[in-house]
Image (cartoon, rainbow, N blue to C red):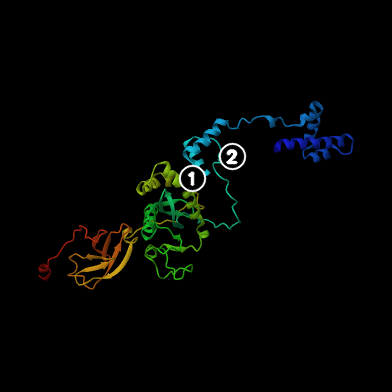
Amino acid sequence: MKNTTMEQELKRMKFEIAQKEWINGKINQQEAAYLLGVSDRTFRRYLRAFEEEGLDGLIDSRINQISHLRAPVDEVFALTDKYKRLHTGWNVKHFYSWYKNKYEGLRSYTWVKDRLQEAGLVKKLPGKGKHRKHRERAAMAGMMLHQDGSSHRWIPDKEWDLIVTMDDATSEHYSMFFVREEGTASSFQGLRETIEKKGLCCSLYTDRGSHYWTTPEAGGKVDKENLTQFGRAMHQLGIEMIPAYSPEARGRSERAFKTHQGRLPQELAFHGITDMASANKYLQETYMPAFNREFMEAPQIEDEAFVPYIGLGLEEILCEQHVRIVDKNNCISYKGKRLQIPPDNFRYHYVKVEVRVHEYPNLEMAIFHGPRCLARYDRRGQLKNTKVKVKKLEEAIA
């Protein structure tokens, strides 16, 4: 028996008792109405309906009527068929965003979820677990950014790392791209894209990965004095780094990655994308803008904490930097390569001089003496075609 039918039967039984007691004068209309859980006026309306139609007059006539809002069978079938043919494996919220935009769906999210669950196409999720204390978001965009990576099979049989740089105040994604393996180069790339787009942030929240922090004891506190290459770059830029000591501490970025893992593989498969270059293009042009439109939140304060970057070329900071001493033949050794310093018009030679090697995310290199670049090299260590004015020894002596 349906709940509505049972409620009507109980209503009739209670009315019979209340009406009998009222006729016998044991209770008044107000008390009778209280027994039924209705007002005095409604009880009098029940009495009139009972006199005209008997107990059947108490049944709500709307129960047997079909709602004009109820979806026809063919609409429900079209919904479930579209999901089975094109979107199998998508979570409900992801599918619903496509359903209402691409397929002009007029139904609510709850209606779509219930129909898919009734058809056995999606499973009901378990309970949320214990209550946790909510951490307030940063008040303004640019006050705190999150950067993290997620390893996942974004396409069949291939596991890539997705690198995301997002704002704590708004959840807006400023940079996201795939790489083979997360590391210093990918972290530099994500931050550079963000700075070029928005400016310098106040702080950056990261996990304790070895490219972000030096951790003397596994699972212990990070060493804020012995900086990694990434830490050195943040120090140069004046950006405070904040380490996270648990996945729960990075809950905002963890939830974002859960959403990406539930959506991106299906969207890449839907568009037939199987290579990293095409996937990164899709992220930049389609997926990230759509994600920001759907999930971005308004900050507490409209002003932004970003400040413009003013200084040397950003690429000369967001790179690995290593000190070397020049050999007698004006060469240095770096990662198994011999980098030859060409002659220039500033010094006769650079023997025993301390220089600095810059290695960029694309694996190309450069040698600097103080602020001056002496030469640039490709990833094989070959000197690139750089125009250098050479001063002849005879001219120098004269």
Q: Nearer the viewer, residue 98 or 262?
A: 262
| Cα–Cα gap, marks 2 and 1 | 27 Å
State left or right for residue 265 relative to residue 22: left
The answer to whether the residues at label 2 and label 1 have Cβ atoms under 8 Å apart is no
* Towards the viewer: 364 or 369: 364
Figure check: 110 above or below 256: above
Q: Which residue is nearer to you in this view: 91 or 42?
A: 91
Q: Which residue is mark 2?
A: 118
Residue matched to label 1: 294
Q: Position of residue 284 (x, y in %)?
A: 39, 47
Q: Earlier in the sequence, mark 2 or mark 1?
A: 2
Residue located farthest toward the front when viewing the structure as drawn: 157
Q: Tell me, yes or no, if residue 99 can be seen here.
A: no
Label 1 neighbour load within 10 Å: few <14, some 14-19, many 20+: few
Task: Looking at this view, name the residue that lies furthest to the top.
Answer: 52
In which quarter of the view is residue 370 placed? bottom left
